[in-house]
Image: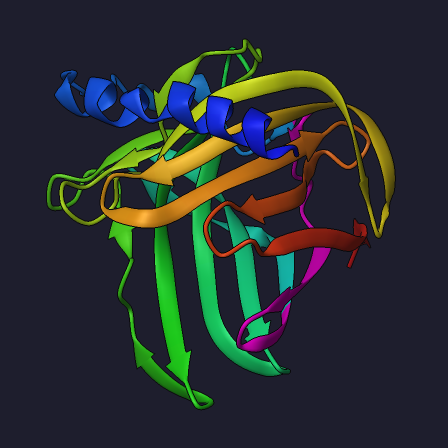
Amino acid sequence: MKHATLMLALAAALPCSAALADEAYNPTITPADFSTTINNPLFTLPPGKLMVYEAKTSEGQERVEIRIRKDTRKIMGVETLIYNDRVFLNNQLREETNDYLAQDRQGNVWYFGETVDNYENGLFKDHEGSWTGGENGALPGIWIKAKQVVGDRYRMELLKGEAEDMAEVVAIGITVKVAAGTFDNCTKVYEFTPLEANAKEHKYYCPGVGGQVLSEHLVEKNRVELVKFGQD
């Protein structure tokens, strides 16, 4: 992206933090309205699906492996699908996360929590970053919406002071080229949190893959791109 365009995107997105932070947030969750069948065209997650990403970072070579597990977990009365995310740095496991997702009747994919295992020098360190909807004041949010509208802003999660990721749709119908191929009709989402000034990313979701194909960290300038996808 050209520098001027990036600045315009950031300028448009920055007020989102204050605006959403000031809004009352208490979503109504009716378990019967949700399913573990996630078939949103931009985020299609059949059990056994595998997506592999790679990036060059200041610390070395990063590899991310995402698998959709065949078991589920019930949160707030909702049966959720388990989205397993493993991050390796220089071939050493650094983090393993189970994200808990479900799709509502409209096709929005909701994020009900995550269990995080952090590692240091190959050894388990802690569970920092974990949260569960309905516990200790934590509330679920939307991972990706059914309908993409430029300028649409939403919470992805809410646990005050610990988990406050937010998102804004900044472009639709775009083409993205990564190691795994070239994809059309993609949606570009700006994700950030008011808890970390440097946590600003552009993420690209594409039909065909039915998932994220690229993540661009706007501060560290890392580019995490899809290199392989299919069934495990």
Q: Residue 150: horizontal and vertical position, in percent?
A: 54, 11
Identified at 56% across, 27% down, the residue is 4
> Hey, which quadrant is residue 181 in on the image?
top right
Q: What stretch of residues is rendered in magenta?
A: 40-62
Q: Residue 99: horizontal and vertical position, in percent?
A: 44, 49
Quadrant holding the N terminus: top right
Q: Report whether residue 144 is seen.
A: no
Q: In this view, does 177 lie to the left or right of 44?
A: right
| 202 inside magenta stretch | no
Q: Residue 184: horizontal and vertical position, in percent?
A: 82, 24
Instruction: Looking at the picture, tell me which residue is in the foreground, 29 or 124.
Output: 124
| 52 inside magenta stretch | yes
Identified at 87% across, 37% down, the residue is 182
Using the image, determine if residue 179 lies above or below residue 155: below
Q: Report whether residue 150 is seen.
A: yes
Magenta segment, prevailing SS (helix, strand or loop): strand
